[in-house]
């Protein structure tokens, strides 16, 4: 173990996720409902955007991954609003004195076009993390018609997060 005063101040993490698009599900991305005939299948609400952000934060803080923290065998998390999962993670970061510096998120979706929703997505996730609007970036990309995402069968997300350790007073 490195003595705490010698630990690096900054840590970076990466997260990815993919969910299948199916009928009879609401499409939730970054905490907002997007009108679309299909939604993402999942034990929770299937919000790939928030799930990728959670894994980036857990990765940066060395706290594991979303599947271990919120197992899909636990009914407690069934159909849960992923914003609630992000708040649990935010609390865990605070307990360990990790401050979120910034998050960058890419949503890979052929349809629907997400441009009109990016601002609202940024505001929601930044608000949940308690960071400035400008520290939360959301990009949306199509898959150029390639693969399962390109065929509109799934939506995926990739995120990075940078954290800074707040020093204890006196260190
Ligand atoms: Mg997921």
Image (cartoon, rainbow, N blue to C red):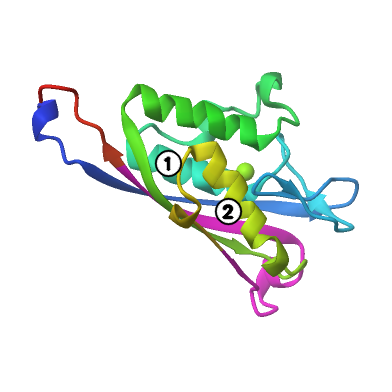
Q: Which residues are magenta?
A: 139-163
Rendered position, 169 above or below 142: above
Residue under the point 25% across and 32% down: 166
Q: Does the magenta segment cover residue 148?
A: yes
In terms of depth relative to the viewer, which is nearer, 33 or 69?
Answer: 33
Q: Does the magenta segment cover residue 117?
A: no
Task: State whether residue 2 appears in this view.
Answer: no
* Residue located beneath label 2 in the image: 122
Give the x, y percent position of residue 121. Answer: 63, 53
Rendered position, 80 above or below 157: above
**Crowding at label 2, few (<14), some or many (≥20) Cα neighbours within 10 Å?**
many
Q: Secondary structure at mark 2?
A: helix
Kindly indicate the quadrant of the structure image that contains residue 9: top left
- Indicate which disc, 1 or 2, sits on the residue closer to the N terminus: 1
**Crowding at label 1, few (<14), some or many (≥20) Cα neighbours within 10 Å?**
many
Give the x, y percent position of residue 110. Answer: 72, 70
Q: Please indicate whether residue 34 sits to the left or right of residue 86 in the image.
A: right
Q: Quadrant of the N terminus?
A: top left
């Amino acid at each position: 173990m490195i003595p705490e005063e010698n630990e690096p101040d900054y840590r970076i993490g990466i997260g990815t996720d993919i969910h299948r698009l199916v009928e009879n599900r609401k499409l939730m991305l970054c905490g907002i409902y997007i009108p679309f005939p299909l939604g993402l299948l999942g034990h929770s609400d299937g919000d790939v955007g928030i799930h990728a952000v959670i894994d980036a934060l857990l990765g940066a803080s060395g706290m594991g991954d979303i599947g271990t923290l919120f197992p899909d065998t636990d009914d407690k998390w069934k159909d849960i609003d992923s914003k609630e999962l992000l708040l649990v993670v935010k609390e865990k970061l605070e307990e360990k004195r990790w401050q979120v510096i910034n998050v960058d998120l890419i949503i890979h979706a052929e349809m629907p076009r997400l441009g009109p929703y990016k601002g609202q997505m940024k505001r929601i996730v930044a608000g949940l993390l308690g960071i400035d609007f400008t520290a939360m970036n959301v990009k949306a990309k199509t898959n150029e018609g390639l693969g399962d995402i390109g065929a509109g069968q799934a939506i995926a997300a990739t995120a990075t997060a940078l954290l800074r350790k707040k020093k204890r007073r006196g260190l």
